[in-house]
Amino acid sequence: MAARLRGRPAHAPGPTYLSYTPNGKKLITVGVNGALRVFQHGSDNEPAIIDVLTDGHTAVASTNDFIVVGAEDGSVTKYSLLTNSMEEILVRCSLPVRDVSLSKDGEWVAVASDELEVKVVNTRDMTRIMHLRDQSRPVKHVSFDVSGSTLAVSCTDGIVYMYSLSSEQPQLIKRVDGLIKTLETDVEASAKVAWHPDGRAFAAPTATRARSDWQRQKAFSGGHRADISAAAWSPNGALLATAGVDKSLCIWETRSQRLLKSYDDVQNAILAIDWHPTDNVCSYTNNNGELFIREDFVPGEHAKHLRIALQPAPMNNDPLSEISGNARKQVGNGDKPNGVRRSAEDQYLDDLLGPDAMSEDEMDFIEDDDGAGYAEETNHVGKRTAVANGGRPAKRHAPFATWNPQVHEAFQPGSTPWRGDRRYLCLNMTGFVWTVNQDTHHTVTVEFHDRQEHRDFHFTDPYKYDKASLNEKGTLFSCRPSSQTQQRAVLYYRPHETWTTRTDWRTQLPAGEEVTSMSLSESCIVATTSKGYVRIYSLFGLPLKVYRQKSMPAVTCASWRDYVITVGNGSVGGDGTTRMLYTIDNIRRDELCQSEDVVALGEDTELRSVFFSDKGDPCIYDTEGVLLILLHWRTPGQAKWVPLLDTKTMDRLASGRKDETYWPVAVANNKFHCIILKGSDVYPHFPRPLLVDFDFKIPVSSFPAGAADDEDRDAAQQKNLEEQYVRASLQHSLASDLVDNTNATSAQKAEVPVMEREVDKALLQLLAAECREGEERGMKALEIAALMRDRTGKMLEAAGKIAARFQRDILGEKITQLAERRLVGLVDEEDM
């Protein structure tokens, strides 16, 4: 059936762009006039019109619920497809916008403009912006990959910049030079990267490069006589549609890079092209304000390519390519290598299953992976012959897919990503360190909570420090290496006050090494690096130790006095994600407290922060809002993570009216100190937020939301008493560990019996509650009495008085017998 061309005058003559919604129900076009048009797929009715205040629209991207439109006045605006009205202006640029790209989940939009930086804006919270500034010239195109974690930036300097956006601190991972042409931002020729649907490779207007090594792979050539103006993969990646400024329109087969169809009825240069997600329909817009919807875009003899499953990207020596027959020498359509004509049904099965599934004598494929210069070719009858290298047979490998585990990214505790031109480098109980981007340099400010003890200071930062750590003795900074200035990574320590002249010091890391996280304690400086090293310095810059971390890549670190905890990626779990492992060292004594133990995180939970409490116990805080502390960590193999607080179960959130999360700062004075984050905020913002503190509340059981009657109130009181007992026992164990394993002070030693009395006090209250319930609760009451830690007999004597008060005579006798046996050292195991 011949393709039926449907041309519609969508906008005034001029550059026009389009986008399908992911579900294919709507098609949106934008152009030079002040209106946006929303077409319903499969309908001949007039499109819905969204009247807007701006004109000169240059880009559009869509989700099922909203669209994002860029304009020449520098605005990027979000419009609702539910109400066909404007929602908000997400960001403004000082120069014209050239392209926008939405991540697959619709959470982020990348904006290319004539400015030198790319802005990546959160579509739900426009105050959350990431800035990509590694380009030296304006950017023409931006393109998210299918996962939304990598952004391809096509710059007018002829370089494609690849950024990793897996965290809110974007990182430049690759400059792909020599791939695209040097183009101005306002020309019709395109340099846009089109990611293949399998996410492993992308097409650009010269060739294809693989994502794993960024090398040129396959070329689609011979279909255009001038520059490419638009390109798009079919939804399953089996076909590629391209358009040129020479008014050409072509369809290519991905597997063989073969030209299947070339249309010669295009009247104006196509600027944007998009496939329908499910139907054999392709739409495009041109430089004359027109929209064309081509039904039956892929001719009938090739339409089977749209019915097969997701196809792998065409890459050299790719095991996945064998599944779709990439490695085979191409023969005529429907022919076997020996010239026998095959049916259309057989050809369709080949497309579905791959040629290897249909033939036993062609199960192997060739990969010249050792560079020896040999391979196999097929002769005129379709058989393989060894060529080069003396006719030796080629290496054969079983076809399998490349798989990469999900690795936890490194982070610096207490730091935040850029928000505008500002970010926090450190937030803790000592103070705040924040920096301002001044383009050519940064300005760093250090503020203290106790300004009588320390004075605030700020300085000009030509190194552009990106990490900091602050305590009562000094401030530690680090910066990344710079390829432009040939600067290496630097550690810079600035002490607050000394009894001699203050001596700042800097040290450079070896070439190619970068600080991934660092920590400052009262006695040492710790830095983990991209090479897997843990580097330890004295406070005066003397290198003390250098060793390679066992679990790599490193994630983060923290320190307290002579103790250092390092966290890294370990073995891969069943879900494809690496397990985070931690190690605790005593630097001064060169002792290992815990080695490669697991960081206890729940499923689909990430580590938010790691730090030491004011008493020196390691703590972690996760993305589920749970604060945990490490118990018995000074004894090898005995450590366990114990929850101190689940912030989601706090009383202040019980009503459901508050929408807030918490940014961890410290555990001090038996409280959790944090910053309240409102709504969808993930990080603290400016101006400087206030610190709040919450009491610990171990999640022993669910607490009744309200006390409707006496029975509910009694149950709530019982749960509170149980939680008090568990919490007091934990604090007693932490205090005992400290005294038993360190040279404790007299105050620390005196705290142990105080905490012991707190445990017994909670048990006495639980005993009274059981006695109040009746004689039938006597067995549980006796069990509670046996848990008392006091060996002087005073607490058991008090327990006997409580039993007598409630007239529990039998219980009183049992408690008296227990006290007598304890007094003479005869305590049965069943009574403990």
Image (cartoon, grey):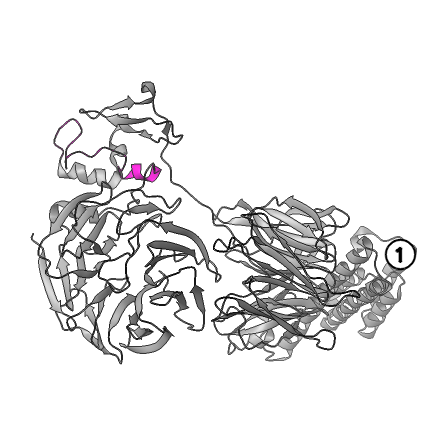
What's the magenta bit mostly, secondary-structure-wise? Answer: loop
Displayed quadrant of residue 471 = bottom right
Residue 560 in view in this figure: yes
Q: Which residue is at a point 80% across and 63% down the rendered structure image?
A: 785
Horizontal side, residue 461 vs residue 239: left or right:
right
Asked if the magenta segment contains residue 320, the reply would be yes
Q: Residue reaching furthest top? A: 390
Q: Which residue is at a point 22% across and 32% down the rendered structure image?
A: 329
- The x, y position of residue 263, in whole percent, is 11, 52
Displayed quadrant of residue 20 = bottom left
Horizontal side, residue 30 vs residue 815: left or right:
left
Element under disc 1: helix
Q: Residues within 10 Å of mark 1 (few under 14, many from 20)?
A: few
Q: Nearer the viewer, residue 316 or 336?
A: 316
Asked if the magenta segment contains residue 90, the reply would be no
Residue 214, compared with residue 377, is above or below; it is: below
Q: Nearer the viewer, residue 482 or 351?
A: 482
- The x, y position of residue 47, in whole percent, is 17, 73
Horizontal side, residue 315 vs residue 570: left or right:
left
Q: Nearer the viewer, residue 189 or 799?
A: 189
- The x, y position of residue 517, in whole percent, is 59, 56
Residue 642 in view in this figure: no
**Residue beneath label 1, please?**
821
Q: Nearer the viewer, residue 568 or 286?
A: 286
- The x, y position of residue 232, in whole percent, is 24, 55
Residue 773, compared with residue 739, is above or below; it is: below
Which residues are the magenta region?
A: 318-342
Q: Which of the image's four quarters has the C terminus?
A: bottom right
